[in-house]
Amino acid sequence: MLILGIDTSCDDTSASVVENGAKIISNIVSTQDEIHKKYGGIVPELASRRHIEMILPVVDEALNKANLRFKDISAIAVCQGPGLIGSLLVGVCFAKSISYFNKLPLVAVNHLEGHIFSSFLEDPLPEFPFIALIVSGGHTNIYRVDGFGLYKELSKTRDDAAGEAFDKVAKLLGLGYPGGPLIDMLSEKGNPETIHFPRPFVNKSFDFSFSGLKTSVLNYVKKNPNAKKEDVAASFQSAVIDVIVTKTIEAAKKEQINGIVLAGGVSANKALRKRMEEIGHKEKIKVYLLPPYLCTDNAAMIAAAGFYHFKEKDFANFDLNPKAYLPL
């Protein structure tokens, strides 16, 4: 069963063909980093316009690389949200059009659900139930996953997502965009113990909060303009990772679950991956790490989750609309 996935939730235009929710036949991603770099962040209007330009060639390339035509496809899966509404609109409208013209079933996929099911595209596969940490530019959430459609939110961010904090601190340090990978690389040259930034633990909750930490970095840099950027980056990153790892491990222990899936763009961070594996091993909790290309936004994860919607005959109608805010 071949599912064509489409994702335009933020600034990457992506299309992918996945077989039976597990085997990637093709996965094409057109990034917009060069467009947004000079602004130090994503400009929604520019992102939407670029999606309009790229959606057709990206879908064509995904089909051509898989040596397939629309007649070979079982269903179209599209990301409905959450995300940038203008960007989402491009993908949803295009998916509805090709679904109607080619008489193919249409399924709508939550972006967060896609990140969870990206873990089923690489061996070893996680076993239900497991804990899913989704950490990205827009989200920092922990879920208990008992099966397809069986998700329990254990925590969320109360303000900034971890990825947003990375981008803002990178901009503050003059590193450029996207900030996450740049902070990660610079931190390897710094000492994470040089500056003790606060660890924002929300009392009696697994929820996250990174706005105060971001402000703390800003105040430190203002008072210490000659501080080594690598030490600031490493100390900031260490604080974020301490909070994320501690809360995720504690959530797994409370739920009595011995498997954790890391997903989302920030899960590609090398220091986070290393620390989560170390603590997981110590606590006898299996940690599932994805290759970086499946951590960031991609349509393969949308197609993978779409396969399960298709099996359940959970089809969308042509009045489907994108949603900037869409709880899982």
Image (cartoon, rainbow, N blue to C red):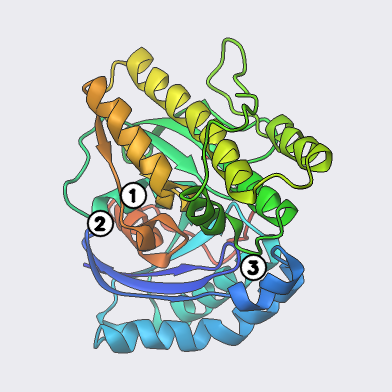
Q: Residue furthest right?
A: 222
- For disc 1, the neighbor class at 10 Å (few under 14, some 14 to 19, many from 20) is many
Residue corresponding to mark 1:
117
Nearer-the-camera pick, 290 or 183: 183
Mark 1 residue type: Phe
Residue situated in front as seen by the camera: 115 or 264: 264
Q: Dot 2: few (<14), some (14–19), or many (≥20) neighbours within 10 Å?
A: some
* Circle nearer the N terminus (2, 3): 3
Q: CA distance from mark 1 to mark 2?
A: 7 Å
Q: Is there a contact, CB below 8 Å, between mark 1 and mark 2?
A: yes
Residue at (41% x, 33% y) in the render: 151
Q: Find residue 282 and report its image quarter.
A: top left
Residue type pointed to by label 3: Ser
The residue sitting at 50% across, 43% down in the picture is: 135
Q: Residue furthest front?
A: 226
**Element under label 1?**
helix
Q: Are marks 2 and 3 in contact (CB under 8 Å)?
A: no
Q: Residues within 10 Å of mark 3 (few under 14, many from 20)?
A: many
Residue 69 at least partly seen: no
Where 312 falls versus 43 (above or below)? above
Q: Does 125 appear above or below 254?
A: below
Q: Please give the name of the residue rendered at 67% of the width and 30% of the height, measured from the top-left corner.
A: 158
Task: Check the image and name the residue furthest to the left.
Answer: 124
Query: Given contact means CB atoms under 8 Å apart, are the residues at marks 1 and 3 in contact?
Result: no
Type of the residue with mark 2: Leu
Residue 288 horizontal/vertical position (percent): 27, 41
Quickly name the residue at label 3. Answer: 87
